[in-house]
């Protein structure tokens, strides 16, 4: 074989290896990683069960259900949920990533008394420009449902405006016993199924949202458990002194 033939075949071989590797990575993501992150921490029952707020979008193109066990009762977790939001208590997630997205992160490490009132028709701010999700259902210490039927403007340049047409974001507190609770978070969405919308949502927003939401649930868990443990210690000291 001549030198020129070997040189011409080398780029082709590299391209073949690159395409094969990319196809393998995509296949692994679709077959294993995506099913895992769409239901991170959730049981089969929690994934399949109809939750309050699901009826607001009957046939979503996307449903993700995440869950975590918090070693605290619902009343110790609820304050961290109702104070969430941009310019409020934050989202208890990765502040560095939020800055890259143009947000102004500030995750509270304490319960903020003047942010404990949240009602239906209020809006949970998501961004500094005031964009947010309307609150639809509030069942204190049990369920928080946010829902929008209006397009949510894209913050990613390659996306078309209004890529999410309908969205619900819900949080559910289900007691296990007196001091343990399941915190279930569900995201359901529908959008205009243009090729660009579908590509960016599936390839970027789904995994990106999971990374942030997983950290958020872990952040809520850590804060609620710490505050609950402190509350119990104070009560024990008061009992000892009385």
Image (spheres, grey):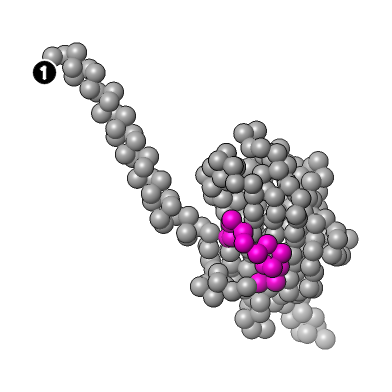
**The quarter of the displayed image where residue 129 is located:** top right
Report x, y in % for residue 115: 85, 60
Q: Residue at x 63, y 68 (%)?
A: 184
Q: How many numbered circles does the render carry?
A: 1
The span picked out in magenta is 51-64
Near-viewer residue (168 or 220): 168
Quadrant containing the N terminus in the rendered view: top left
The question of residue 182 being in magenta is answered with: no
Mark yes or no: residue 100 visible: no
203 on left or right of 164: left
Residue 220 relative to residue 214: left or right: right
In the image, residue 80 sits, relative to residue 95, either above or below, namely below
Question: Which residue corresponds to the image point at 75% horizontal and 55% vertical from the top-left?
Answer: 148
Q: Residue at x 48, y 55 (%)?
A: 34
Position above or below: 172 against 177: above
Q: Label 1 crowding class (10 Å Cα cut-off): few <14, some 14-19, many 20+? A: few
Q: Quadrant of residue 92?
A: bottom right
- The residue beneath circle 1 is 1
Left or right relative to 50: residue 131: right
Give the secondary structure at mark 1: loop
Is 87 on the left-hand or right-hand side of 187?
right
Q: Which residue is pictured at 33% across the width and 34% down the height? A: 18
User: Eyeballing the image, is 132 above or below 182?
Assistant: above
Residue 57 painted magenta: yes
Quarter of the image holding residue 204? top right
Q: Which residue is nearer to you in this view: 193 or 40?
A: 193
Q: Residue furthest right?
A: 114
- Screen quadrant of the C terminus: bottom right
Where residue 65 sits: x, y (%)?
A: 58, 64
Q: Position of residue 62 (x, y in %)?
A: 58, 56
């Amino acid at each position: 074989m001549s030198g020129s033939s070997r040189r011409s075949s080398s780029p082709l071989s590299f391209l073949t290896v690159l395409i094969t590797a990319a196809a393998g990575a995509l296949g692994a993501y679709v077959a294993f990683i995506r099913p895992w992150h769409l239901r991170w921490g959730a049981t089969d029952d929690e994934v399949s069960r109809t939750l309050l707020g699901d009826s607001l979008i009957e046939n979503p193109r996307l449903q993700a259900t995440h869950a975590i066990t918090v070693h605290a009762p619902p009343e110790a977790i609820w304050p961290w949920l109702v104070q969430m939001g941009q310019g409020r208590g934050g989202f208890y997630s990765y502040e560095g990533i939020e800055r890259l997205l143009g947000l102004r992160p500030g995750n509270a490490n304490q319960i903020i008394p003047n942010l404990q009132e949240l009602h239906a028709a209020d809006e949970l701010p998501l961004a500094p420009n005031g964009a947010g999700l309307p609150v639809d259902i509030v069942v204190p210490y049990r369920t928080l449902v946010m829902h929008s039927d209006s397009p949510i403007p894209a913050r990613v340049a390659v996306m078309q405006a209004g890529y999410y047409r309908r969205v619900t974001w819900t949080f559910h507190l289900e007691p296990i016993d007196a001091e343990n609770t399941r915190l279930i978070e569900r995201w359901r969405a529908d959008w205009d199924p243009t090729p660009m919308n579908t590509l960016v949502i599936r390839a970027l927003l789904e995994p990106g949202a999971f990374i942030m939401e997983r950290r958020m649930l872990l952040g809520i868990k850590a804060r609620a458990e710490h505050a609950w443990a402190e509350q119990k210690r104070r009560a024990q000291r008061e009992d000892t002194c009385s």
